[in-house]
Image (cartoon, helix red, strand yellow):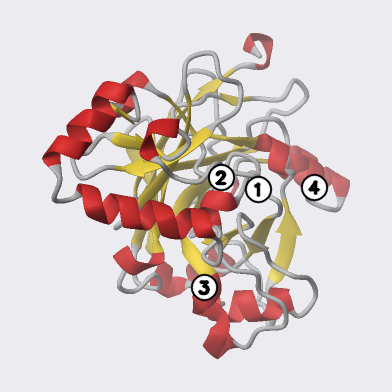
Amino acid sequence: MKIVSFHVREDAFPHTGAVSPTGEVLDFDHPSTGLPARTGPFDWLDEDGEHLKAARALLDALAGDVARVDALREAGAVCASEDLCMAAPVPRPGKFICIGLNYKDHAEESGMDIPERPLVFSKWSSCVVGPDHSVLLPRDSTEVDYEAEFAFVIGRRAWRVSEEEAMDHVLGYTCVNDVSARDFQFADGQWQRGKSCETFAPMGPWLVTRDEIDDPHDLAIKIRIDGRTLQDSSTNQLIFGIPRLVSELSQAYALEPGDVISTGTPPGVGFARKPPIYLQPGMSMEVEIEGIGILRNGVIGSEEG
């Protein structure tokens, strides 16, 4: 299942849905679906709740029922994606956790030792934006960088779980661009400001559920800037895979449905190039991960935001 979030007309709150059997979007929040009304922002992402189970059952039923799909389309519950304003699949995560130096080839590029334990930091959840949303360059930064990242989303509360249990707590996967103001990051001595400027966490285009990806640790990952491939690697280069990350993080704090963990970036980032490549107004970015899709975002200058 491909889970999406989107805005409908003037509705300020994003709806949640999924790509239907016809390739359109089924709006879980539309009353004509008969699905339970949500009571919180992460109901559709909770593997143990009634909402996601009911949504899965409806999608399965629609796969063989053309008349019912037509009726839902007529009611406005099935829409063409181009008629919707797409948001990040998790528009405001409860936690946005990031892992640094988690690709063998990126650690080598950065001249850093392979870490013995995951290097954990965070981004403010308020900097999340969706596909086709523009990234805004900060007024006081001239060294804004791109970072293609493979992320996973928690779908079941995880507290002190083992590595063997970890995958049962993962709902699915998505693309993230961990945009970073390197001058802020390196000058501050810690990473929060440089990683969390407005719009610095593009995510999408959707969340692909775990059952659709055979091996998340063997996926091609790349980024194109203005059509030029600048990062090109594989998740088989991850130092710490999903089970280790879920287990280790959950020893310190509970992971909950809707939490996003972005697993790090491969080599080819802008600051490590000679000469460096930093984002400029008018540039286009495409993060592509095998089996998930392409996350596209443009770049605009500080005066445009």
Disc 3: which residue: 104
Residue 285 visible at all? no
Of the numbered discs in the image, which one, if any, rests on residue 90?
A: 2
SS assignment at label 1 = loop
* Residue 41 falls in image quadrant: top right
Disc 4: which residue: 192
Disc 1: which residue: 93
Q: Amino acid at mark 3?
A: Lys
Please tell me which of labels 4 and 3 falls first in the chain: 3
Is 217 located above or below residue 63 in the figure? below
Circles 1, 2 touching at the beta carbon (< 8 Å): yes
Judge left or right: residue 223 versus residue 130: left
Asked whether 195 or 88 is in front, the reply is 88
The crowd level at tag 3 (other Cα within 10 Å; few <14, some 14-19, many 20+) is many
From the viewer's perspective, is the residue at label 3 or at label 2 nearer? 2
From the viewer's perspective, is the residue at label 4 or at label 1 nearer? 1
